[in-house]
Amino acid sequence: MRRLLTDESLAQRALTELVGTKKPPRRRSINVTQVRAELEVLLAADDFENMKPTHLVALWVRCHEKVYGVTPAEMNGETWLGAGSAAAKLVRVEFGGSMTAAVEFMRWTWRREQWREKKARHDGENRVGHIGWRLQFVMRHLLTDYRIDVARRRGQ
C-alpha cells in the first residue's frame, strides 16, 4: 500500500532537492604547537606583516611566559580561536590592518609590564593580576596608554 504524501512532506522534499541537505557545522581547531613554531620563524625574520591573528595570540602567550614565568592557564583551543578573532579585530579597527603596528603596541605593552614586574620584585611588592588576552586584544585601556606615551614622546 502506498503512503499518501502530505503537502508538508512534498514541500520538505522539494526544499531538500533544491538546497540540499544541511551539512553539520565545521569544528574549527588550531594547532598551537604549529602556530608557535611559525611565530618563531616570523620573529627571527622580522616578518610581522605576514603574521596572522593567531600569531599575535602566540606572541601574547610567549610574552606572558617570559614576563610572569608561567603559561596562561586560560588558553585552550576554543580560547585561542576567540583570542585570535579579537586580535584580528584589533588589527583591523585600531591599526588599519597593519600587523607591524600591532606588534609595536604589544612590544610596548610587554616592555612596560616587564619593567613593572621587576620594580615590584625589587621593592618587595606582591602584584596581583596579569595582562590577559582580553586586556591585550579586546579592552582598549592599554591602547590608550600606548597612544598617550607615543604622543608624549613625539611632543618632546
Image (cartoon, rainbow, N blue to C red):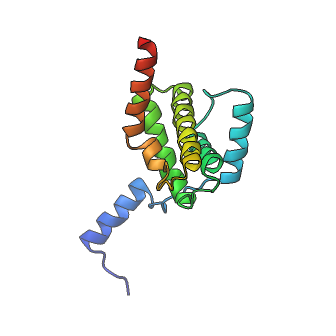
Percent x, y for residue 146? Answer: 44, 29
> Depth check: 152 or 10 in front?
152
Quadrant, the C terminus:
top left
Quadrant, the N terminus:
bottom left
Q: Is residue 5 left or right of residue 152?
A: left
Q: Is residue 24 left or right of residue 4?
A: right
Total number of numbered labels? 0
In the figure, 138 relative to 106: above or below?
below
Quadrant for residue 154, please give it. top left
Percent x, y for residue 143? Answer: 41, 33
Q: Is residue 145 left or right of residue 68?
A: left
Would residue 146 be seen by someone viewing this image from the given angle? yes
Which residue is located at x 57 percent, y 33 percent?
107
> Depth check: 100 or 14 in front?
100
Percent x, y for residue 108? Answer: 53, 31
> Depth check: 36 or 145 in front?
145
Which residue is located at x 56 percent, y 58 percent?
75
In the figure, 28 relative to 57: above or below?
below
Q: Residue furthest front?
A: 123
Would residue 27 be seen by someone viewing this image from the given angle? no
Which residue is located at x 63 percent, y 29 percent?
50
Q: Is residue 77 left or right of residue 92?
A: right
Which residue is located at x 47 percent, y 56 percent?
128
Q: Residue furthest left?
A: 7
Q: Residue furthest bottom?
A: 1
Percent x, y for residue 27? Answer: 54, 59
